[in-house]
Every structure is written in structure tokens, then in C-alpha cells.
Image (spheres, grey):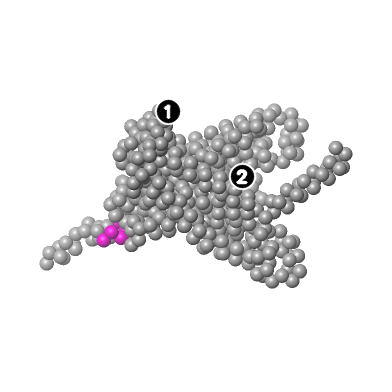
Amino acid sequence: METFVDGIAWLFDSANWQGPNGVAVRLVEHVWLTVASVLIACALAIPVGLWLGHIGKGGALAINVSNVGRAVPVFAVLSILILTPLRFSVWSTIIALVLFAIPPVLTNTYVGMREVDRDVVDVARGMGMDGGQLLRVVELPLALPLLTNGVRLAAVQVVATATIAALVGGGGLGRIITSGFGRRDLPQIVAGAILVGVLALLVEGLMELVQRRFDPLRRARRAESRAGSDAVAAVTGS
Amino acid sequence: MPRVALGGHAATLADDCILRNEWVCPAYVVSRRDDLAAALGEHVYITVVALALGTLVAFGLALVARRWRRLQGVVLGTSTALYTIPSLALFSLLLPILGSLGAAGLSATTVIIGLVLYSLTILVRGILTGLDAVPADVREAAVGMGYSPRRLLWRVELPLALPTVFASLRVAAVSTVALTTVGVLVQHGGLGNLIDRGQSSNFKPEVLTASVLCVVLAVVADLLILGAERLLVPWRRSVA
């Protein structure tokens, strides 16, 4: 238990926050790697997912990419990238992060598009909407909850993957843990682990808020349930 | 000519792709098969023990969550929060609990406990979903036939929940195999140890061979569990 206290004390020592290997630098590194990778993954995966979902093809690809992503170890991909001409550049890390962020975004976007009620799509077509309008006005808003869920999963995944980059000499908060191992400094290891854990939980919470904001049907659903309970109240006379 | 004499040496010829440091190198697999077997053995051991323990604990937790509904939110919330914490941090946080940086901390046990904690999120959810999906009619019929709660669970609810339980077990197995590599942090990552050694000494065949073995192991685990499901849930075969 006292090691945890030592770890927290390590976090409150301002000396550990300064310098090129300090917490501040590593935290900024971790956050920008995460943001950049999630954005790149979204830019690649969302259009493909929307398009495959819109034309209703490539389902096996969109679903299986997630299974493959689960089976391939992050550490293996990072190690392989390090031995390519990319070497220890920041691109090795970013490519690995993007590769592991694509599956959840792609799969969720596709499933979100396919789960749009077929009747609604037919009605929209009957009203004379063309493919582009259908996608923009009907399918995309209805697929948005699952799409943002995919982005949330990707963000959490990337925060975790970015720590593993430290095992092969990449940047980010994982470095505090690995350098703690190098110096056999248990309080530093624990402090790094607490930082990484707190960051991951923060990102998860933040993305959950974003997800709720981006749910266009939330207000409608709430109004509906209120109307529903009013109706029940009217019927039962309570 | 000395060149011919050298070339005539079978070992030198076979070792060529090792010397050239090529990604794909059968000679590496042959000459380091003992290393590969040892790493694979550790990988399988860690994965199997973690999955077995994870399944047992998950069943216990799922039954507790079903018996006391109020605990369900706590159980699901805690396991989801644990899943959010990156593996590198989770393994590290187990160190002070297991006894510092000594032999106890830097052991396969640290990795196994971490992996058990991760598998819980997937397995508890899968078991609860499976049990909750049992049709109420079926349950009522069994109760009407005089089934005790325990018999109801073992004879009716669990068998009907098996397809969902197996689906979650497959997901847990595949991700456990992949996550085991991160155990290299405490020097017990199975094939991850070889990937680490190859990467730090710039030895391409070692990194690629160990990585491919990892993926193969995940696929084999997936297929084995699928096979077990076919055996244990025979009524599904006729449906599908």
C-alpha cells in the first residue's frame, strides 16, 4: 500500500513534471498522438463505412476488420514498424495507432448505417430523395449514435495503444512507466500507471459526453418517453 | 577456391537469410525452434490459465449480479472501468500488490492476473446477456415442472445461454492471446519476449515469426472454442 502513497507523492513532486522527460512533455505528446491518430482514422474509416453501408455491400469486410484488429498484437505491429525504413520516427507510432483505431470506427459506422430502418429509407426514396440526400438527411443522422460510439471505442483504444508505444521507445506517458522499470524505481512506475489510467478514464468519460451530444434523437426520444408517461398517466388516471 | 568450400557448407547456405536479416526466413524457424517452442509454451500457458480463471470468476460474478440485482451495475461498471485502463498501466499497478520488483512481481502471475481482469469485462457481460435472454416461458415451464432454482440454472438456463457465453469466450480468448505480448513489461510476455528481443537487436525474422505465431495462436484458440461449442451445443448445428 505504501508504494501507492509513494507513487502519488512522486506525482506531486514538481521536479518530475519538468524537463524533456517530465510528465508535462509526455502528457502533451500522448494527447497529440491520440488526437492526430483518431482524426486520421476517422478521416479514413468514416467515408468508407458510410459508403459501404449506403450501398449495402462489403459487410463481411467491415465486420471482420474488427476481429482481425483484436487478434493482432499492438506490440507486434509496433515492433515490425520500427524495423521498417520508418525506424523510430513518430510515424511508426502514428501508423500503428491509426491501424488499431480504424476497425472500431469502420465497423460501427457500417453497422449504424445498416441498422437504419429500411422502411424509413424506402419512404425517403418515395419522397424523391436521391442517394446523396438520403445519405445526408436520413441515413447519417440515424447512424450517428453508433458512429460516435465507434469513435469513442477508437479513442480509448488509441490511448491504450499509445502507452504500448513506450515499450519500443516511442513517446507518450508510457515512457514514465518504462523508464521507471529501467531505473527499478517502483514509485515512478506506479505514478506513471496512475497517470495513464486516469487519462484513459478521462478520455472515456469525455467521449461519452460527446457521444451523448451527438445523438440527434436523444431529445426526440426524451420527449417521446415524456409523452408516453403522460399518456399512461392519463389512462390510469394518476 | 575458398568460396566454393564455404558454399559447400550446408549450414552457411541455410543461414543465409538469417545473415541477410530477411523478414521471412525458414532457416530461422529451424535453428531457433527451441526458443520459439519455449516462448510459445509460455504464451499458451499464460493464456489458458488466464482464460480458465477468468471464466470461473466471471461465472461467480454473473451469478452474484443475478442474485442481487443491485450489484449488477457495480459489477458491470467496475469491470468496464478496468477494461479502460491500458494494459501497460494495469500490469504496473499490480506490482505493488504482488510484491514490488522482486521475483513475485516480475512473474507470469502478474500477467495472468492482469489478463483475468481484462477477460472479466467481456465474459461477465456475455454470461449475463445469455442468461437474461432465456425466454420467460421456458423458465416458467421448468418451475412448473418442479425444478429447483439450482436445477433450473444448470439444466435449463445455462445450456440455453451457452451460445452467447461461447461467443464472449471467443472474443476474450482472441484478445487475451494478443494482450499476453504486453507481459514483456515484466519479462513474461510469451512470444512477446521474442518480439522484444528481435526488435531491440534489429533481427527481422525473429520479430515477424513470433508475431505471425501470435496471430496463428489466436486463430487456433478461436477455432478450438468454436469446436467445443459445436460439441456442447449440438442442437444449434441442426438449426444452422
Compare residues A166 and A22 and report the one nearer the observer.
A22
Q: CA distance from mark 2 to mark 1?
A: 42 Å
Amino acid type at image mark 1:
Met
Marks 2, 1: nearer the viewer: 1
Q: Residue A61, located in which quarter of the rendered image?
A: bottom right
Number of numbered labels in the structure image: 2
Q: Main secondary structure of the magenta part?
A: loop
Up the image or down, A217 lies above or below B100; here it is below
Q: Which chain's residue wears label 1?
A: A
Magenta stretch contains residue B33: no
The numbered dot on residue A1 is 1
The answer to whether the residues at label 2 and label 1 have Cβ atoms under 8 Å apart is: no
* Residue B181 appears in the picture as rendered: no
Under tag 1, what secondary structure? loop
Compare residues A102 and A206 and report the one nearer the observer.
A206
- On the image, numbered disc 2 is attached to which residue? B163
Magenta stretch contains residue B26: yes
Q: Position of residue B212 (x, y in %)?
A: 40, 54
Under tag 2, what secondary structure? helix
